[in-house]
Image (cartoon, rainbow, N blue to C red):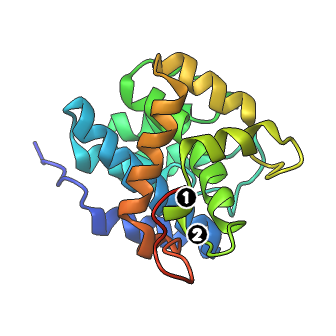
């Protein structure tokens, strides 16, 4: 029997950048990766697996943006390339159109942070300093209620993700913000001015 070598982050990065050139999509993948790693630590799960699922969840979106193809095609590509089944399942299931129920904690966390990370990014970028250090849960919740703001972010997905994960909305938002702050330079969200003291 031939053992399949474990996939490394470098392997995942290779696949991610093979399919994704758009800078915003790359930063989104990196944001979700770092959030997933933080949640993996919180829940006592494998940070490599969770981070990989986060990075790769939208890796096929640039080529397959159609809701009936996105993540479904990606899941097939990841299977063919020997990625762990739990990563493939979480990536595929994060698109509701796949028809796969989000059964595992990994699936639920990925869905719960995906759209929220986009809303947090948008909230940071409209700040005068463009800094995520100036963002807090209250400011994100306020922007969430403004339907004209970041229209492409699904509020229903955010709410559904929080319900499925059975977490407090404000605590969840604050956790995601902290995770993104830790990776601010990589995400281009460290801001143009000095770090502020509060949101």
Instruction: Say which residue appears at 79% left-offset and 52% top-offset.
Output: 150
Question: Considering only vertical position in the picture, is 187 above or below 180?
Answer: below
Q: Using residue 59 as the reference point, say whether residue 80 is left or right of it.
A: left
Q: How many marks?
A: 2
Question: Considering only vertical position in the picture, is 104 above or below 30?
Answer: above
Which SS class for mark 2?
Answer: loop
Q: Is residue 13 visible?
A: yes
Residue 59 marker: 1
Q: Nearer the viewer, residue 176 or 34?
A: 176
Q: Using residue 15 as the reference point, say whether residue 63 is left or right of it.
A: right
Crowd class of label 1 (few under 14; some 14 to 19; many from 20; radius 10 Å): many
Q: Are marks 2 and 1 in contact (CB under 8 Å)?
A: yes
Location of the C terminus by quadrant is bottom right
Residue occupied by mark 2: 20
Instruction: Say which residue appears at 38% left-offset and 31% top-offset.
Output: 106
Q: Position of residue 154 (x, y in %)?
A: 74, 38
């Amino acid at each position: 029997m031939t053992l399949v070598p474990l996939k490394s982050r470098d392997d995942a990065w290779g696949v991610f950048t093979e399919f994704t050139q758009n800078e915003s999509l790359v930063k989104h993948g990196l944001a979700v990766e770092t959030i997933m790693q933080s949640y993996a630590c919180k829940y006592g799960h494998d940070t490599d697996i969770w981070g990989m699922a986060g990075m790769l969840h939208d890796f096929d979106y640039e080529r397959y943006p159609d809701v009936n193809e996105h993540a479904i095609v990606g899941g097939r590509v990841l299977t063919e390339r020997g990625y762990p089944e739990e990563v493939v399942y979480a990536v595929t299931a994060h698109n509701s159109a796949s028809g796969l129920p989000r059964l595992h904690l990994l699936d639920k966390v990925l869905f719960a942070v995906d759209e929220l990370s986009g809303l947090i990014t948008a909230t940071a970028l409209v700040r005068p300093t463009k800094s995520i250090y100036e963002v807090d849960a209250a400011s994100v919740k306020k922007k969430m209620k403004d339907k004209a703001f970041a229209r492409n972010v699904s509020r229903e997905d955010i709410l559904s993700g929080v319900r499925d994960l059975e977490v407090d909305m404000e605590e969840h938002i604050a956790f995601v913000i902290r995770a993104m702050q830790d990776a601010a330079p990589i995400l281009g969200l460290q801001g143009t001015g000095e770090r502020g003291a509060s949101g």
